[in-house]
Amino acid sequence: MKVFEAQKAHEVLELNWALVADFLTRFIREELAWRGYQKALVAVSGGVDSATTLALAVRALGAENVHALALPHRQSAPESLSHARLVAETFGVGLEVIEITPMVEGYAERVPSMTPRRRGNLMARARMMVLFDKAEEYRALPLGTGNKTERLFGYYTWHGDDSPPLNPLGDLYKTQVWRLAEFLGVPKEVVKKPPTADLEPGQTDEADLGVRYLRADVILEHYLKGYPDAYIQGLGYTLEEIQRVKERVNRTHWKRALPTVALLSSTAIGEFYLRPLDYR
């Protein structure tokens, strides 16, 4: 019975992938158009999220209107760049490689207290600096690549990975991104490898989070919809897993909000003063 219930729980993550792909393709095309852009730029890491984003961008705009960047650091895993090349080749997009080591280490060498985690955050933010500069050069809009699980867990570098103004995958859990990637023809080498931010040697997402994505995503979906812990436990999940998921969501809410503004007037931006365009 428990096995059946667990299988049934995973079904809540299943979607019509052809419909999802068509919707996100239209989303990218329309959102770029009203902003006045015809081209998109994607930082391709060699991971499944950026690969899926690139695939969607090509569907929406055509390969000739999509630019791809690889932004390796000297401690990046070698397969990250090789997989980025594979993804770009698969979807017919040229890949520009820009080494970020001099940018990151130029600062890190001046800071004796530098830690691996801080260096990883520097890497993420350096990549966004390059991404936005290149976007200006190409007159292209940068696309974000973060998924719903990462966003809910706050598992990203604030004002790093979350910076691009458009995020096609932001309402898809990690396990759903894997399924969409398979539908879109993302290379199996990319889809099947263990997910990692590749900011520290040997780092993996699931080791950091302490729970597998497949289990975390089902817990998240039920928790967000208001199901009590006892019900989720009945689906085959441990109380420790449930508490770990809830704790990560609840303590990182601030990372999913705009900067908190001290209100001094009745025309505070984003609080009281909203033009009709801001409601779009």
Image (cartoon, grey):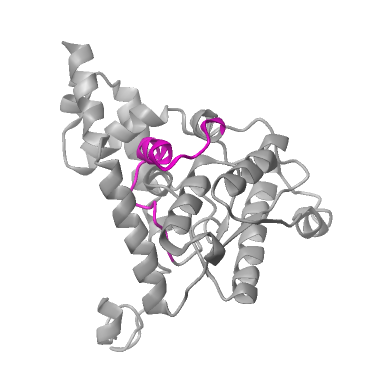
Magenta stretch contains residue 180: yes
Which is more toward the observer, 118 or 30? Answer: 30
The residue depicted at 29 percent of the width and 45 percent of the height is 18
Q: Quadrant of residue 181?
A: top left
Task: Residue at 23% x, 13% y: name it.
Answer: 3
> Is residue 138 placed above or below 42 in the rendered structure?
below
Q: In the displayed structure, would residue 75 be above or below residue 22?
A: above
What x and y, as percent, mark residue 104? 75, 56
Asked whether the viewer can see residue 261, the reply is no
- The reply, left or right, for residue 3 in relation to residue 180 is left
Location of the N terminus by quadrant is top left
Tell me what residue is drawn at x 18 percent, y 42 percent. Answer: 225
Magenta stretch contains residue 254? no
Q: Residue lying at the far top in this picture: please name it.
A: 1
Q: Is residue 86 above or below residue 7?
A: below
**At which x and y percent is residue 240?**
34, 24
Determine whether, in the image, residue 14 is placed left or right of residue 40.
left
The quadrant where residue 243 appears = top left
Q: Is residue 82 visible?
A: yes
Which quarter of the figure is the C terminus placed in? Answer: bottom left
List x then y, in percent, for residue 25. 36, 58
Q: Residue at x 67, y 59 (%)?
A: 126
Magenta region, residue range: 166-189
Q: Quadrant of residue 239?
A: top left
